Image (cartoon, rainbow, N blue to C red):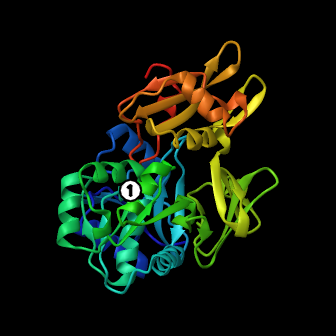
Amino acid sequence: MDRRLHAVVLPPGPRLLAALAAALDGTGPAICPLSPDLPEPALRALLDVLAPHAVETEAGTAPGPGEPAPVPDGTAVLIATSGSTGTPKIVELSAAALAHSARGTLERVGAGRGERWLCCVPTSHISGVQVLVRALVSGGEPLIHPRFDTGAVLAAASEAKGAHISLVPTQLRRLLDAGADPSRFGAIILGGAAAPPGLLAETRARGGRLHTTYGMSETCGGCVYDGVPLAGMRADVGADGRIRLAGSSLFTGYRRRPDLTAAAMEGDWFVTQDLGALEAGGRLRVRGRADDVINTGGEKVVAGEVAAALARHPKIRDVAVVGRPDPEWGERVAAVVVPAADTPGLGELRAFVRETLPAYAAPRELDLVDAIPLLPSGKPDLARLRSDQE
């Protein structure tokens, strides 16, 4: 373990791309991309855990704030997890794992040599890093946007017709609402959060080559496309209902936390925090997070399954489901809904859920909002959603 590590606090752009390329081919140090928009206290806390040799910013490169710790040989990129349900961990990824993941995606979506990738997701998250890795592996010059902007993405789609793009559901929804022609993109890779069925159907009906993905930082991003693992990856569901993943795109470990690494692994399998089921032909269906099970009146409700059921209601544009404290039931099932043209009522939503799920899974509370609050990664902000102060 003697490879240097740099914290790269840079916006998406050529300098970050060059640092990533050097980290992958070994001519430069390993990097941990961090958002330059992080508040100073949060950045300091991450740097304390990261222990880099240097910190790169737009102003230049300076020594790290404390005693540096090298990373394992072969490690290229470190990612601070989103922390949607807890304290962020720092995931170590090897150059080999990142390249394997990129090649698997290129093969699955039919992306050819030199074809362009459009990056408009955060490059401090694995989703943005992997867009850039795919571009580097395929030999194409990526189109990099500092942040998601509907007008800029539409202009880029017109300029570079056929560019492949990675999005979260909210971004795709905004593009369609702005009149985007999804057929002008190459592959549309959709991940980060569960997507409403209506959004998927509309995109495909309008000619979009859409792939839904499942994965996380520990698997170099999406490793299961449309329910089927990429080449070299395996998916299974354990007796406890948790999804297990194995293969060449797995992480090396958590930075300076061998205890957490050991706890997350069972032999070759990475044990996720998500519940799933294997359907006909071995296709993986993600039910929801294991730590987002709502205990209501002694019954256990998987929030993701209720959200998936509600998302099929014609009056719902977007939805999230959480448990909130309840003096009688322990927790109550709460639906946070972005309505479509017509506004749904709690009674009709309860009846709709009871058509496919047990009665105790039906929501007992309905919040109507203009938009689901999101983390920078595009995932729903569960902490805010669980609050009844929305």
Instruction: Provide residue 300's location: percent of width, then percent of height.
Output: 74, 33
Residue that appears at 47% across and 53% down: 192
Viewed as shown, does residue 312 lie left or right of 132? right
Give the amino acid type for the residue marked by disc 1 in the picture: Ser
Q: What is the secondary structure assignment of the residue under circle 1?
A: loop
Q: Looking at the figure, which quarter contains the C terminus?
A: top left
Residue situated in front as seen by the camera: 222 or 29: 222
Quarter of the image for residue 56 reads: bottom left
- List x then y, in percent, for residue 237: 74, 59
- Looking at the image, which is closer to me, 198 or 363? 198
Report the front residue among 175 and 356.
356
Image coords of residue 36 (percent x, y): 29, 50
Q: Is residue 28 visible?
A: no
Q: Which residue is mark 1?
A: 124
**In the image shown, does 279 or 341 lie closer to the viewer?**
341
Give the residue drawn at x 29%, y 53%. Answer: 175
Q: Residue at x 33, y 39 (%)?
A: 39
Q: Looking at the image, is 103 positioned above or below residue 234?
A: below
- The quarter holding residue 40 reads top left
